Image (cartoon, rainbow, N blue to C red):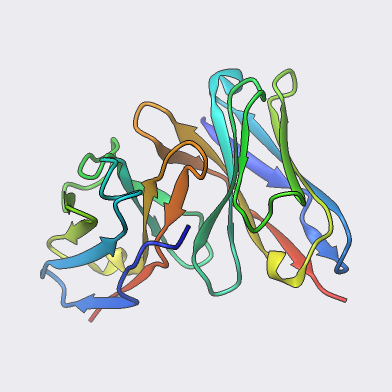
Amino acid sequence: QSALTQPASVSGSPGQSITISCTGTSSDVGTYDLVSWYQQHPGKAPKLMIYEGRKRPSGVSNRFSGSKSGNTASLTISGLQAEDEADYYCCSYAGSSNPYVFGAGTKVTVL
Amino acid sequence: EVQVVESGGGVVQPGGSLRLSCAASGFTFSRSWMNWVRQAPGKGLVWVSRINNDGSSTRYADSVKGRLTISRDNAKNTLYLQMNTLRGEDTAVYYCVRENLDYYAMDVWGQGTTVTVSS
């Protein structure tokens, strides 16, 4: 089971919008509407930001949004803020045998 | 407060063993499916293992199958990861994670415990 494909880095200026892509296969992202996104600041534990591809847990800013098309999911951060600078990981459910596959992560830099 | 707290990490020689523990509180542990996720130094997150709520079903990543064993004690609200025949590539921070079955995402993460395999 290969890792999902994410860009290594994405950057943007404060106030701008950025989008992180996450490409999988027909065995994971393409089959299940169960992509989640996690934010991880250096030295900290990951935090759930998006589940079921587009839903936000309570307390997560509505500046974070998700979508999916075919085998590719995306995370968009609008109104970029300094505190958004972190690593972001996508994750897809992939069936009961090997249930989860993560992306390699994307480092977001706020210029 | 809903939380999980890992312990048991340390330095171990190649071929050695270690047992990680994860103490859960603030939620009904016995109804929760749990996972271990690891992160090698400077690398990304990798799913390692999953156990259902009563321990009757377990799953493992191919890279750890036969060497790592996940288990739980619901009476003690504790999750375990027995790690045997450890290799250098097992060096990582190990996170204990609650899986939310309503939407198949990992919604509660511990702070992690570090395992270093080195001679």
Number of marks in picture: 0
Q: Residue at x 48, y 57 (%)?
A: A1
Position of residue A64 relative to residue B34, above or below, is: below
Q: Going by the image, does A86 lie left or right of A44?
A: left
Q: Is residue B36 visible?
A: yes
Rendering coords of residue A78 (x, y %) = 13, 60
Query: Looking at this view, is A30 or B114 the one in front?
Result: A30
Position of residue B116 relative to residue B25, above or below, is: below
Rendering coords of residue B53 (x, y %) = 59, 23
Q: Which residue sits furthest front?
A: A26
Q: Quadrant for the C terminus of chain B, please.
A: bottom right
Q: Going by the image, does B21 lie left or right of A57?
A: right
Query: Looking at this view, is A50 or A71 the one in front?
Result: A71
Rendering coords of residue A102 (x, y %) = 43, 57
Q: Residue at x 16, y 77 (%)?
A: A13
Q: Quadrant of residue B56?
A: top right
Q: Going by the image, does B118 lie left or right of B28?
A: right
Q: Residue at x 57, y 40 (%)?
A: B35
Q: Quadrant of residue A104?
A: bottom left
Q: Residue at x 38, y 52 (%)?
A: A91
Q: Is residue B91 visible?
A: no
Rendering coords of residue A99 (x, y %) = 47, 42
Query: Looking at this view, is A40 or B117 the one in front?
Result: B117
Q: Going by the image, does A69 lie left or right of A31?
A: left
Q: Which residue sits furthest bottom?
A: A111
Position of residue B38 relative to residue A100, above or below, is: below
